[in-house]
Amino acid sequence: MARVTGIGGIFFKAKDAGLLRDWYKNHLGIDVSNWGGAVFEWADEAGNAFKGMTVWTVFDQNSTKIGTAGFMINYRVDNLAELLAKLKQEGCNVDDKTEDSEYGKFGWVTDPEGNKIELWEPPAGQ
């Protein structure tokens, strides 16, 4: 069973999320959308697009979406249900809650240092 197949997203908190988003947009050229983040579509060395993306998002420091740490990494996985079951079997701290949406399936596990990790099974074909 493949476990992690790539990074699906990087999320972090900011004291002033709007200011930080503007800084990244103005100084690093990240095209921050109205929802607070950007989507980087994957491409090969010649610039040809292929299926896949990485999401980048800045949340307000009071957000509960990413736990108590200042960041959360979203990892792409092939089979979320199978991996979550395996992680539970291995004694990992797996959140019982999962989400299934048009964007795919999501589950969470907390590492030994208390960092919340999001696991993402993209929709078929992505």
Image (cartoon, rainbow, N blue to C red):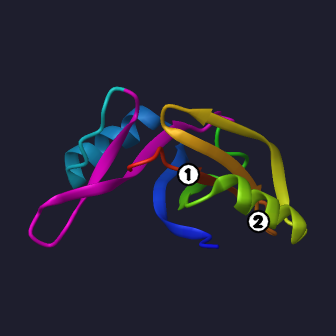
- Res 69 seen here: no
Q: Looking at the picture, which amino acid does disc 2 mark?
A: Asp
Q: Which residue is mark 1?
A: 121
At label 1, the amino acid type is Glu
The reply to whether discs 1 and 2 touch (Cβ–Cβ < 8 Å) is no
Image location (x, y in percent) of residue 117: 66, 57
**Which residue is the site of mark 2?**
111
User: Which of 10 and 1 lies nearest the eye of the viewer?
Assistant: 1
Magenta segment boundaries in residue numbering: 35-64
Q: Residue at x 57, y 68 (%)?
A: 4
**Labels 1, 2: front one:** 1
Determine the secondary structure under disc 2.
loop
Label 1 to label 2: alpha-carbon separation: 19 Å
Give the left or right position of residue 101, taking residue 21 as reference. right
Which is nearer the eye, 93 or 51?
Answer: 51
Q: Main secondary structure of the magenta part?
A: strand
Q: In the picture, which quadrant includes the N terminus? A: bottom right
Crowdedness near tag 1: few (<14), some (14–19) or many (≥20) residues, C-alpha within 10 Å: many
Q: Is residue 6 above or below residue 105?
A: below
Could you say which is closer to the camera, residue 111 or residue 105? 105
